[in-house]
Amino acid sequence: MEQPNLSPDLSIRQLNDWAVMQSQRLRSGLSGDSANQTAFVLSQAAKLAEEVGELQAEVLGQAGYQRVTKGRVFDGNSMAGELADVMICVAILAGSHSVDLGKAVAAKIQKIESRHQPSTPATD
């Protein structure tokens, strides 16, 4: 498979497309029942939970509430890596459910923004 040419300002569409390709790559490496759709989705949900846990540890570490383990540095680079892991897992999970992440995020942002719009007074 050809390596995608991804820029640092990756779009949600590019992430979504890459995640679909990655899902196919991951599933091709599985055997038997673990390659079926249900098992794959469950394993990706578990992977997302794992990555969120690592992100939580990173947040706690940067706030000084995590025990510093040998060789573990909590900094901007490690935070970026953990956030990226979470986003990738979310994109793979979205792709496995045929969710258009770009549309979903845009719709959610629009909903959030509508809560903050000043209400227009009724006119007679």
Image: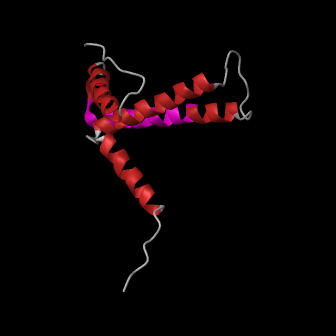
Question: Is residue 46 shown left or right of residue 40?
Answer: right
On screen, residue 81 above or below 70: below
Prevailing secondary structure class for the magenta stretch in the rendered image? helix
Q: Give the number of callouts.
A: 0
**In which image quadrant can residue 102 be found?**
top left
Relative side of 61 to 94, left or right: right
Residue shown at 32%/17% (left/top)?
5
- Residue at figure coordinates x 58%, y 22% from the top left: 77
* Residue 37 vs residue 13, the one in the foreground: 13
Q: Residue 83 lies in magenta, yes or no?
A: no
Q: Which residues are magenta?
A: 36-54
Residue 85 drawn at (x, y percent): 47, 28
- 71 vs 49: above or below: above
- Of all residues, the one furthest to the front in this rendering is 124
> Is 51 left, or right, of 61 in this rendering?
left
Name which residue lies at 33% across and 39% down: 94
Colour setup of the view: secondary structure
Please tell me which residue is depicted at 68% across the width and 31% down the height of the picture: 62
Q: Locate the N terminus and report the quarter of the image it occupies.
A: top left
Where residue 17 sits, quadrant-wise, is: top left
Which percent across, then down, holds residue 98? 25, 40
Q: Point out the image quarter for the C terminus.
A: bottom left
Q: Is 67 on the left-hand or right-hand side of 116?
A: right
Q: Position of residue 75 (x, y in %)?
A: 65, 24
Task: Specify whether residue 52 is painted magenta.
Answer: yes
How far across and how far down the image is residue 120, in percent?
Answer: 42, 73
As drawn, which residue projects farthest toward the top? Answer: 2
